[in-house]
């Protein structure tokens, strides 16, 4: 029996058809992966189901009965819950308080705190959520916050769960923990839609797969038998896609960017401990590590966002110091790990975001006045070359899908032709076609003689692109190897602090 049937769904916007007469069904007790590139219509289709986006045509059946879903409240009343990419939790409230808000059990006129605690704890235990209900949300990891959102939906009676890009910001360990929970939910006969573009994860968790491309359903209810990652990539993009590309380095030069004895102390705790790294011209140095081991702080000191407690940086033998603007002027480019926090102003148009940080260059400004035509031409060129899906350069960047927002950041930095690139999580939240393109561009820049530091939670990405790989653990670089001399198993052991690795400079 189908928990959900969506028939002939059409959603149009002024300049684009986001969902083009799509039909979709979800079996009861199934984990159904809804795949597609950024902007393919996945989230829009599910927002229609959740009542966040009104459809222009079509009908929806829940458990075989046609329903009208005009708001999230209607969806919740029908047993549908949705967990968004960006969580909707109050950081100063506890886990229990966030879960029960607006659904508090009452004892006469007061909240029955004891009953609330019991009900939430029963759900935590039943589905292996492994979190403390008394903890404040601000003290939880990203993965734990996501679990709170899932708990909140289940507490409200959801039997149909929509998870929108649930693994986009999770560590590999957190992904595994999420999959344990999803399997437990499936055992309880919950029906789950996972919106994603991560192909390995789809094959690991899904029972059924449907693929959207350019707003149309190109494959529905595909069984996983004899399906490969390459098959899914080709369905998503409509052409053959090169995954895990690797190209031999034939243009490696001398050391160009150096990090010497860099330490950082915050609130009396040493978060970076005597970091020493060097990157040659024409080289990608990859940093692997479980998030929270100093990567963020390393990025911040290498881009001028934080001043190290001790240590120095050198580019071409010249010491570099100062604020982020000085690093930019010294042709050090930065792809930030969090595009919303460091990379974009979501309430500004794409055009303005494409020149952020570079807006005072002679190309874009003269005598304090912006060169509108130059900026417009530059924006149109970047949108075309980096395949940013948008009706216009004047659209607010916040209206784009996550992957297209990332392309704006990538285009802005790559187009300025930096000598050194600090690249953090370049393909986080980016689909397989755009990932292929970004990887090609990074290898192209390397082959042109650029020095690139790549920091990524995606071990496949680090291994396929890097010439050398260092592992960061507890704020220290604990090993450095040529990429072809260390396998995934060894890296995983280093990343968990299991052993120290010999350096190979």
Image (cartoon, rainbow, N blue to C red):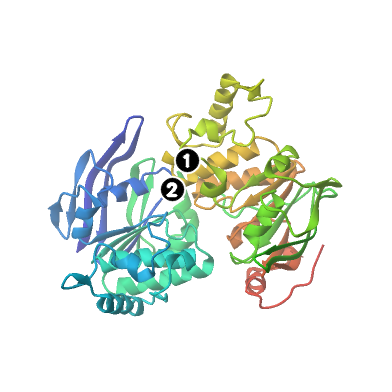
Look at 57% across and 41% down and name the residue there.
Answer: 409
Which comes before the other along the chain, label 1 or label 2?
2
Q: Which residue is mark 2?
A: 236
Q: Is residue 83 visible?
A: yes
Residue 3, numbered label: none
In the rendered view, does 144 fall on the left or right side of 50? Answer: right
Q: Position of residue 94 (x, y in %)?
A: 39, 69
Q: Nearer the viewer, residue 359 or 85?
A: 359
Look at 41% across and 73% down and name the residue there.
Answer: 180
Q: Position of residue 88 (x, y in %)?
A: 37, 56
Q: Residue furthest left?
A: 65
Query: What is the spatial separation of the Cα atoms under label 1 and label 2, in whole angstroms?
Result: 27 Å
| Mark 1, other Cα within 10 Å: few <14 / some 14–19 / many ≥20 | some
Q: Is residue 182 visible?
A: no
Look at 43% across and 48% down and name the residue there.
Answer: 236
| Quadrant of the frame with the N terminus | bottom left
Q: Nearer the viewer, residue 214 or 113?
A: 113
Q: Position of residue 58 (x, y in %)?
A: 20, 43
Q: Is residue 243 above or below residue 175?
A: above
Q: Residue furthest front?
A: 109
Residue 346, numbered label: 1
């Amino acid at each position: 029996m189908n928990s959900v049937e969506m028939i002939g769904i059409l959603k149009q916007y002024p300049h684009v058809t986001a969902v083009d007469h799509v039909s979709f069904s979800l079996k009861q007790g199934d984990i159904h992966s809804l795949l597609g590139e950024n902007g393919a219509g996945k989230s829009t289709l599910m927002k229609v189901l959740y009542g966040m986006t009104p459809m222009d045509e079509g009908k929806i059946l829940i458990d075989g009965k046609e329903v009208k879903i005009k708001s999230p409240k209607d969806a919740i009343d029908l047993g549908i819950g949705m967990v968004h990419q960006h969580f909707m939790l109050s950081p100063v409230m506890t886990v229990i308080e966030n879960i029960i808000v607006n659904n508090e059990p009452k004892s006469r006129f007061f909240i029955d705190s004891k009953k609330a605690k019991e009900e939430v704890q029963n759900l935590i235990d039943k589905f292996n959520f492994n979190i403390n209900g008394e903890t404040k949300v601000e003290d939880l990891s990203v993965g734990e916050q996501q679990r709170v959102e899932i708990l909140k939906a289940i507490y409200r009676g959801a039997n149909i769960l929509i998870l929108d890009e649930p693994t986009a910001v999770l560590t590999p360990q957190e992904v595994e923990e999420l999959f344990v929970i999803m399997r437990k939910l499936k055992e309880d006969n919950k029906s789950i839609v996972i919106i994603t573009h991560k192909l390995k994860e789809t094959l690991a968790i899904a029972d059924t797969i449907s693929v959207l491309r350019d707003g149309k359903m190109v494959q529905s209810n595909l069984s996983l038998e004899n399906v490969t990652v390459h098959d899914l990539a080709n369905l998503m993009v409509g052409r053959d896609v090169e995954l895990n590309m690797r190209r031999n380095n034939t243009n490696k030069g001398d050391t160009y960017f150096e990090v010497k004895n860099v330490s950082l102390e915050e609130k009396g705790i040493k978060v970076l401990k005597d970091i020493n790294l060097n990157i040659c011209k024409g080289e990608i140095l990859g940093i692997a590590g479980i998030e929270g081991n100093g990567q963020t702080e390393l990025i911040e000191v290498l881009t001028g966002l934080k001043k190290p407690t001790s240590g120095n940086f050198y580019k071409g033998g010249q010491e570099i110091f100062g604020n982020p603007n000085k690093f930019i002027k010294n042709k050090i480019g930065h792809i930030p790990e969090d595009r919303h926090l460091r990379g974009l102003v979501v309430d500004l148009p794409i055009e303005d975001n494409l020149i952020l940080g570079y807006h005072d260059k002679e190309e874009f400004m003269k005598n304090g006045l912006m060169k509108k035509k130059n900026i417009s031409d530059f924006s149109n060129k970047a949108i075309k070359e980096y395949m940013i899906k948008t009706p216009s350069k004047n659209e607010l960047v916040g209206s784009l899908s996550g992957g297209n927002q990332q392309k704006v950041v990538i285009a802005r930095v790559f187009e300025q032709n930096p000598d050194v690139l600090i690249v953090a999580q370049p393909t986080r939240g980016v689909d397989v076609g755009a990932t292929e393109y970004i990887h090609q561009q990074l290898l192209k820049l390397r082959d042109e003689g650029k020095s690139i530091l790549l920091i990524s939670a995606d071990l496949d990405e680090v291994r396929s692109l890097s010439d050398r790989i260092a592992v960061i653990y507890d704020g220290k670089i604990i090993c450095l190897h040529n990429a072809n001399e260390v396998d995934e198993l060894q890296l995983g052991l280093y990343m968990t602090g299991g052993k120290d690795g010999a350096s190979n400079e």
